[in-house]
Image (cartoon, rainbow, N blue to C red):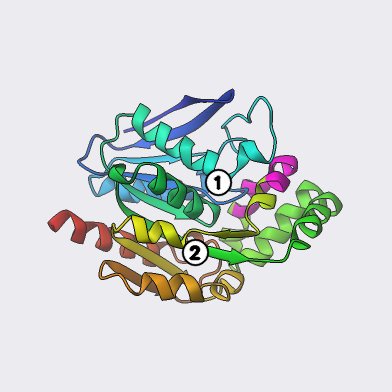
Amino acid sequence: MKTSGSVAVGDGVEIAYTNYGGDSAHSVLIGPGLGATQLGYEADAKFLAAQGRRVVCFDLRGLGKSTRPTDCSKEQVSPEKLGADAVALARTLNIRSVDYIGHSLGGLVGLEAVSKAPELFRSLITYGTTYELNYPFIIVPLQALMYKLLGKKRLADFVAKKSSHLESAQDLIRRHFAEFPTDVGKMMSANIYRYSYLKVLEQWRGPILMLKGSLDVSINNNLDSTLGQLRKRENFQLVEIPEAGHFTNLDKPELVRSAIESFLKKLDEV
């Protein structure tokens, strides 16, 4: 069963979502990365729904089919706001327990959501996400300049080729970014060049699975502090995905889905 809709979360924002499968004790919520939409996670959602799980994919505010805030500003598209949207979506859809899957920025959205409503989340699964980053400020204007110089079409091609070596994955990434609103993207990017969610890991002790694409160099080069903290947890699992880039689920879908389902099955048995 597949149904689509939207949920009003305030600020004039409607969060678009797609629900796969029927009710289940623990529902999977999938949060996309910056510039991505539900499109890139549909196959994953269908796979997990076929295992008997309720799965909900959604678009971040201002991206995909979700609407932008009435007063669209850097503050209105911060990870804090995006995390609050995820919590509001889950509660509106009467989801009682969440296994959250977050890709890239979607992982930060999950960490924000966990910090706001820890009782709602059973587990956290991330890929293409580091929980702490400390880039110099110069990265912000440089990224904004890149958006301006490239334009939508060339930006889509650049991201596709940089993120994956597979033509099938590149084609899907281009479709993600075909209608990417670069003004929203610039504001979101300005919020995430420097951050730390390591304290969230101290406050929330739920199970965590991290999928690490071997070719996702920019993220992997910034994982030391994150992994140092995560490896202190008994309920942390790291799965390395060979020959996979930033869009790990598109490069190695079978390995990613198998790792996620195996992780969730073990939680179901507890």
The magenta region covers 173-187
User: x and y percent of residue 34 in the render?
Assistant: 60, 50
Position above or below: 154 against 69: below
Q: Earlier in the sequence, mark 1 or mark 2?
A: 1
The count of marks equals: 2
Residue under label 1: 79
Position above or below: 39 against 146: above
Q: Residue at x 62, y 55 (%)?
A: 192
Q: Residue at x 61, y 71 (%)?
A: 218
What kind of residue is marked 1? Answer: Pro
State the predominant SS element of the stretch in magenta: helix
Q: Nearer the viewer, residue 75 or 95?
A: 75
User: x and y percent of residue 133 in the render?
Assistant: 59, 65
Position above or below: 119 against 269: above
Position above or below: 27 against 216: above
Q: Which mark is residue 248?
A: 2
Instruction: Decide: few, some or many residues near mark 2? Use Cα within 10 Å; few <14, some 14-19, many ≥20.
Output: many
- Magenta-drawn stretch contains 184: yes
Which quadrant is the N terminus positioned in? top left
Which quadrant is the C terminus positioned in? bottom left
